Amino acid sequence: MPLELYLDLHSQPCRSVFLFAQINKIPFEFKAVDLSAGEQYGEEFGKVTIIRKVPVLKDGDFILTESIAILQYLAAKHRTPDHWYPADLQKRARVDEFLSWQHTNIRTHGSKVFWFRGVVPAVTGAPVSKEKMDAAVEDLNASLKTFEDKFLQSRPFIIGDKISLADLVAIVEIMQPVGTGLDVFQGRPVLSAWRDRVKKELGVEVFDEAHKVIMNVDTLPQTFEKKGLPEFLKLKLQKMFN
Amino acid sequence: MVRTCEAQTRLSKLFQKMSLEMYLDLFSQPCRSVYIFAKKNDIQFDYKKISLFEGYQYSEEYGKINLLRKAPAIKDGDFCLAESVAIMLYLAEKFHTPDHWYPADLQKRARVNEYLSWQHSAIRIHGSKMLWFKLLIPKALGVEIPKEKIDNAVEDLNASLNLFEEKFLQDRPFIVGDQISLADLVAIVEIMQPVGAGMDVFENRPNLKAWKDRVRAEIGVELFDEAHQAILCAQESVKTMDPKRMEHFKPIILRYFLS
């Protein structure tokens, strides 16, 4: 039975898993989950995982959620090149340190900016208040500053000379707000240079393929008009602005 | 000869103790998991007790240890490391702790990793909020949090706890199976945080309570209680805190909790 990966490439953690599998030539069946239609809350997906999030890996009977866990699992099972998740104690610790930190920093803030710029206006027809938007962008800028000052510094990649899972997870998260037209690389030459290096290491074609949907996120209003607005989105927005 | 060997062993233990520093404030959940893990596994360390409430994390001194300005952080010789999950994985590997903490088996390890990843944006966030809403913000700003906000936070925490029980624990003794792992350790310290705020999360959750008792027994009741002493006295200790010394929290509170 082939490996199944449940993905929606609008989602950052789906992109890192997709890219990792593609680059390492790990064969898999792409099981599309349409988040904008609320498929993650459907009965069928609920049988896959009650966490109701993507990505999900299904390897025979073994079902695994959380992109970090999936990447670590694939790296070990398919014995991918050491640089992705080095055996060296301190190098591995540096990867783990970033993978842990990013959850509530770059991921949270990048996602918020994406929602505020890309999703909320598409749903409500109105922009988010300037105050809220400015605060979200400020938080994102602070995370990017920490990323450059602490995690990247003057190294080619986060842990040194070679790309690792840390760079992969970082790039997909940083690309999220870019999809809404906010060029976070502008005015950040070190970050831009790192992005170019990562893109080259991953492969420009597969990078662009993974990021195609997010770079076209301005079509979301038409999507909602065509398919209707899923219930979960209304509730999420209510809670976000409470 | 014997005396020389003894001296060498004492010296190397001393060197080992001196070479690993751990910067911890036991009010903080991730500090507790690191503390418990090290003590349980007899890992010798130099305990650098810090106070987050007093803002030590913003000092120039601490900036040299951890630019992220959070706790825990360790300094092992010249190697500085932040993030409790990274720290525990590092210690587990370096000190060859028993396999059950972070199993070598591919699928078991994946289950631990899955929990360690999920918890950041779930139990950790919602559990933390309770301490802030019920104790710290009223003290620091002299305001009561509106009931609706507290109710929403409790609802979120309950949703996380439901998922914890339905997906991660189910009818197993521990998250990964028969033995305790890093997943249980990280889970318990986070779940104890709202308890410190006065919320009995175990009420009407007999399965969760039974798991907690198992985890506490496995860790060792004395060590568990020692690590949780500060947080379980939070209601009392916050009363005596000086709001003027909590100025550095105001921007964080306004941005993340009251916006």
Image (tube, coloured by chain):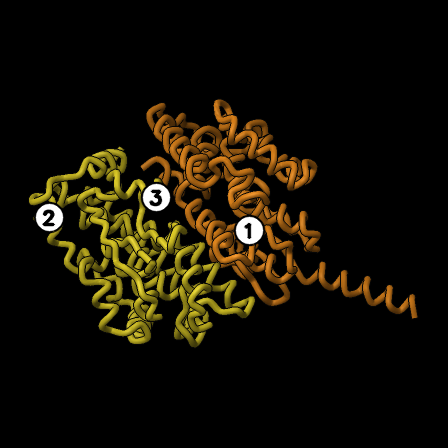
Chain colours: A yellow, B orange
As helix, strand or loop, the secondary structure at mark 1 comes to loop
Which residue has dot 2 on it? A223
Q: Are marks 2 and 1 in contact (CB under 8 Å)?
A: no
Residue drawn at 44 percent across, 60 percent down: A72
As helix, strand or loop, the secondary structure at mark 2 comes to helix
Is residue B48 depicted above or below B93 in this figure? above
Is residue B31 depicted above or below B169 in this figure? below
Is residue B119 depicted above or below B12 in this figure? above
Amino acid bearing label 3: Thr
**CA gap, disc 2 to disc 1?**
45 Å
Mark 3 nearby-residue class (10 Å; few <14, some 14–19, many ≥20): some
As helix, strand or loop, the secondary structure at mark 3 comes to loop
Q: Position of residue B40 (x, y in %)?
A: 67, 47
Q: Nearer the viewer, residue B205 or B255?
A: B205
Camera-nearest label, 3 or 2: 3
Camera-nearest label, 2 or 1: 2
Image quadrant in which you'd find residue B4: bottom right
Amino acid bearing label 2: Thr
Q: Chain of mark 2?
A: A
- In the image, A42: left or right of A62? left
Q: Which quarter of the rendered picture does the C terminus of chain B lie within?
A: top left
Are tags 3 and 2 found on a single chain? yes
Residue lying farthest front? Answer: A1
Q: Chain of mark 3?
A: A
Image quadrant in which you'd find residue B102: bottom right
Which residue has dot 3 on it? A49
Residue drawn at 47 percent across, 50 percent down: B111
- In the image, B4: left or right of B39? right
Residue drawn at 35 percent across, 53 percent down: A58
Residue drawn at 35 percent across, 62 percent down: A170
Which residue has dot 1 on it? B72
